[in-house]
Image: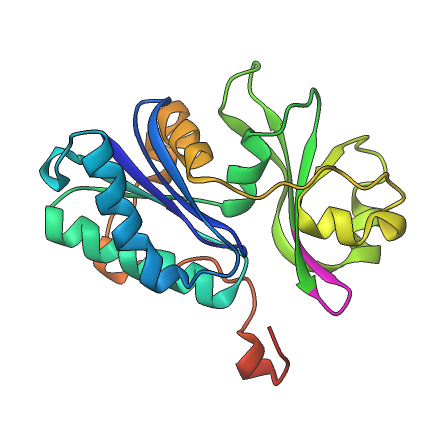
Amino acid sequence: MLLAIETSTDYGSIALGRGSDLIGEVVIGARSRHAESLLPALEFMLQSARLARSDIRGIVVGAGPGSFTGVRVAAATARGLAAGLGVPLYAFSSLACLAVEAMASGPVCAVFDARRGEVYAACYDRVENRDELHTLLEPRAVHVDELRKGTAEMHATFIGDGARRYADALGIAPPPPAFPRAGGLLRLAAAAPASGLVEQAAGWEPDYLRSSGAERGIAG
């Protein structure tokens, strides 16, 4: 039984599952405060599934990039739960979390809006049509023009709020709305648990990829 936490974008979510089998998932709305909503959502989901916290055998967290505050909240909550329950912590890229749920054949580029013409982006391909992903472009913070040049020969499917916002700049049709969901983290953990295992959970930090907006003197 694994608990997954993903709050790297405006919409957060938590999920419970065994392997890739989803038992329950709660989506936290864009206007909700993730820090205040995560634990009540967890208790609601456990009660609905008639489970206790002691049934949880591992925590899976979206490691970013994304909203600095959201990523930080998920990381702190996941570390606290892993320590309190005495269970392993697993971390996977939030971009990979979005990509694994894309209904597409061939390469997929997950793109989050990082504002001011920049995006967080990574590109993946499935390994033998399973949920295990092969990384074609490592997660990075780049200007949208640089991303277009770097993916010109991939013939990839683009997904995410960054792809929607900068569709014209990327030369693509705006993709449907999509955000990384905790259920995707469960799929990644089921496909390749060893690749996400955090050896020292207490000192683990997520992949912000760049400093916070406050540190850089900009909003967001």
Q: Residue furthest bottom?
A: 217
Q: Locate residue 59 relative to residue 170 in the image: left or right.
A: left
Q: Is residue 12 visible?
A: yes
| Residue 136 figure quarter | top right
Tell me: residue 36, above or below residue 17.
below
Residue at the image point whose x is 21% and y is 42% from the top: 88
Q: From the top left corner, tell me how far across and down residue 171 is, in percent.
A: 90, 44
Residue at the image point whose x is 14% and y is 41% from the top: 53
Residue at the image point whose x is 58% and y is 23% from the top: 126
Q: Is residue 205 visible?
A: no
Residue at the image point whose x is 33% and y is 32% from the top: 194
Quadrant of the image for the C terminus? bottom right
Q: From the top left corner, tell me how far across and down residue 114 is, in percent.
A: 66, 62
Tell me: residue 55, above or below residue 148.
above
Residues rendered magenta in the picture: 115-120
Q: From the top left corner, tell me how far across and down residue 200 is, in percent.
A: 23, 53
Quadrant of the image for the N terminus? top left
Q: Locate residue 220 relative to residue 88 in the image: left or right.
A: right
Q: From the top left corner, tell me how far across and down residue 4 is, in percent.
A: 34, 40
Coloured how? rainbow
Tell me: residue 20, above or below residue 181.
above
